[in-house]
Amino acid sequence: MRNKKKTVQYMFNEIIFLGPMFAAFLMVKFIPLIMSAVYSFSDWNGISSGMSFNGLVNYRKLLADSQYWYSMGFTMKFAIVSVILANLLGFVLANILTMQVPGRNILRAVFYIPNTLGGLVLGFIWRFIFLYAFGYLAEAVGLSFMKIAWFNTSISSFWAMVIVQVWVLSGYLMLLYIAGIVQIPGDMVEAARIDGAGLAAVMTKVKIPFLMTTFTRCIFLSFLTCMRVYDINLALTAGNPFRSSESVTMNIYGTAFTGSEMAYGCSKALIFIVIVVVLSSLQVYLTSKSEVEA
């Protein structure tokens, strides 16, 4: 009787603590996903009260949508470059700020601050920097390459977005790497140094193998963040010039809301979700294998 009462109490506690989160997940994530899947097989424009199902018309149209696939390729390229650079910078900062560096806690906070600001705010701030501050700095120190027209070409717009994304992500990833580094047994590092291992050997033979779980998480989180970039893209380049720096999320939003093709936008979103899930799963699988081997 007492065990049954405890079981009921545990179930009640689980409902109290997990119920609101589960309900929010259903309302914000799961139900909209199911509705998007249904709408993708229709001709609904997002405004009218009626709709009719048209089968795979939207998906056949999607296969021939060159701008969508260009945006997908642009986003993937942006994600790959940003993930590599952000993780590299975050890892380097984490190693430096786990040493006995004066004011390291203040420096950690300074590098993390960009994550506390909204993407639109960061985008507008950096747009001002690219358009004006870099120009003044180039004239002051004689670095002419900083005075380029950052938003006039697809290549320069791409690298402008990468710079901002890496600046934002690296501070967050730095904290994750710091959390992993402080968990490495100090006696193992000390033993490696006593055996004559240099800085490079300690890094490759001791630290990196122990941090493979952290690498898996950081790469996964940064990849998802970069693939769904929207606010920075909107504020910084708005897809210009001529939609050559348009992310896939901006393409989907423009189709569904600006172009009033909600059903077609839903089909784009579902294909995007499938691609992200497949790539993320592949990344986690490959890096997890390295964890086991380590």
Image: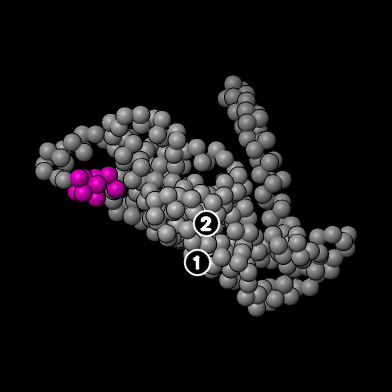
What element does badge 2 sit on? helix
Q: Residue furthest top?
A: 2
Residue type, mark 1 in image: Ile
Query: In the rendered structure, which segment of residues is drawn in magenta?
Result: 199-208
Q: Which residue is drawn at 74% across and 57% down?
A: 35
| Residue carrying label 2 | 161
Question: Badge 1: how crowded within 10 Å, few (<14), some, or many (20+)?
Answer: few
Q: Locate residue 265 relative to residue 79 in the image: left or right.
A: right
| 230 and 146: which is toward the camera | 146
Rendered view: 54 above or below 210: below
Indicate which disc, 1 or 2, sits on the residue closer to the N terminus: 1
Q: Locate residue 198 relative to residue 255 in the image: left or right.
A: left
Q: Which residue lies furthest to the right in this view?
A: 49
Q: Which residue is drawn at 38% across and 48% down?
A: 89
* Residue 203 forms part of the magenta stretch: yes
Q: Which residue is drawn at 11% across and 43% down?
A: 196
| Residue carrying label 1 | 155
